Image (tube, rainbow, N blue to C red):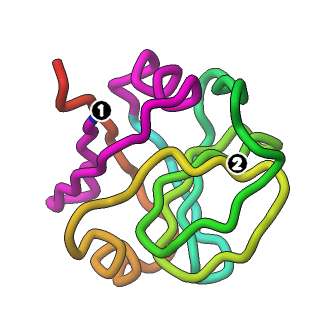
Amino acid sequence: MRIEISINDQRFQATLDDSAASRDLIAQLPLSLEMTDHGGVEKTGPLPSPLSLDGQPAGADPDVGDVGYYAPGNDLVLYYGDQSFYNGIVVLGHLEGDAAERIADMPGPITATVASLDG
């Protein structure tokens, strides 16, 4: 499953893992999310509906460039820095190319449009 994330005039692609949470995200697309910066490592924005946690561990240690879901806040997360293990994190997939570095260069809050590339 592939998605495209548009921020200002930049477009990024990501490949999502085949999971119940990723399928729930795809079902909510397209979305426009107001995302805030947290700790200089991630951009987070609230989703309209929670994603399924079926088959997911209690938490995760996301890598730079991962696309994630923070269940306690019902947020989609774009990781552009090093985040440690935390309960409630679900890794949904990974940004392609230099997307994490380009997102890191965007200070403060952003508006991201997320759409499916799989039709």
Q: Residues within 10 Å of mark 1 (few under 14, many from 20)?
A: some
Q: Quadrant of residue 20?
A: top right
Q: Percent from the top left, x then y, of residue 74? A: 71, 37
What kind of element bears circle 2? strand
Q: Element at badge 1?
A: loop
Sequence-wise first label, 1 or 2: 1
Q: Nearer the viewer, residue 30 or 107?
A: 30
The residue that appears at 71% across and 37% down in the rendered structure is: 56
Between circles 1 and 2, the one closer to the viewer is: 1
Q: CA distance from mark 1 to mark 2?
A: 20 Å
| Drawn side of residue 51 relative to residue 17, left or right | right
Instruction: Give 26 or 61, whichever is nearer the viewer.
Output: 61
**Residue annotated with mark 1:** 1
* On screen, residue 68 above or below 98: above
Relative depth, front residue between 75 and 9: 75
- Residue 44: x percent and y percent? 58, 56
Would residue 79 be counted in the magenta stretch? Answer: no
Instruction: Give the residue at x 44% y 80%.
Output: 107
On the rendered structure, is 66 left or right of 50?
A: left
Does residue 11 show up magenta in the picture?
Answer: yes
Residue tagged by mark 2? 70
Q: Which region is colored magenta?
A: 2-31
Q: Residues within 10 Å of mark 2 (few under 14, many from 20)?
A: many
Q: Which mark is residue 78?
A: none
Residue 70 pos. (x, y %): 70, 48
Amino acid of disc 1: Met
Amino acid bearing label 2? Tyr
Residue visible at 17% across and 55% down? 11
Query: Against 116, is 63 above or below?
Result: below
The residue at 23%/58% (across/down) is 8
Say whether residue 106 is left or right of residue 3.
right
